[in-house]
Amino acid sequence: MSLIHPYYQANYNFCPRCGAKFLAKETPLQCQNCGFEVYANPAPTSAVIIEHNGKILLAIRKNDPQKGTWDTPGGFIEPDESLEESVIREVKEETGLTVKVIGYIASAPCDYDQKPTLTIGVYAQIVSGTMKPADDVASLHWVSLDEIPDNIGFDSVRMVIEKFKTQQKNK
């Protein structure tokens, strides 16, 4: 057993099944009353690298957390979705573009509004559509790999971009 992530310590004080107070602060949290267990698993998210003419598509975040910072298209993977289905949905919602996933880049742990996440970076190709910022995106920009802004909103997204840059150099 290990100590539970601070997000779960702060937000999971009572058993969601029977309402009894959790006593231990180790993972998994186990209800002493009914035996229900809560694992401190990260929520899976995607960071999508879309390249066109030597540039990648970046977004300015419209909402918190990290409002006003740079990000890639992507987001949370829903319980009934595959990674690929989530990428297609998120990119369409945020950019108006339809994409297909070409490959895996890297993964990295992160936090989203203090909740633990696991960001899965993928490379996608545009299939169709007209680019237009929507959903939680304030604006979209094609950015050269040599001119990536410093204020990327999430460390995991920065790591995915850096890994993509390294992969491109090694081609």
Image: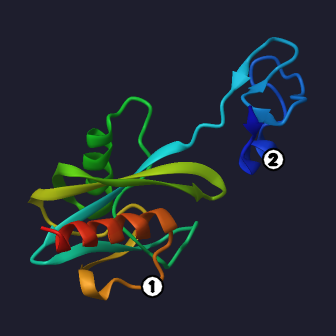
Judged from this view, the residue extending furthest toward the front is 170
Residue density around tag 1, few if under 14, some if 14–19, many if 20 or more, within 10 Å: few
Residue density around tag 2, few if under 14, some if 14–19, many if 20 or more, within 10 Å: few
Q: Is residue 171 left or right of residue 115?
A: left
Residue at mark 1: 150
- Which amino acid type corresponds to the residue marked 1 in the rendered image? Asp
Q: Say above or below: 51 vs 128.
A: below
Q: Residue at x 25, y 80 (%)?
A: 145
Say which of marks 2 and 1 sits in front.
1
Q: Quadrant of the C terminus?
A: bottom left
Q: Can residue 110 be seen in this snapshot? A: yes
Residue at mark 2: 10
Q: Nearer the viewer, residue 1 or 55?
A: 1
Q: Say above or below: 130 vs 127.
A: below
Q: Say above or below: 35 vs 6.
A: above
Q: Is residue 59 left or right of residue 130?
A: right
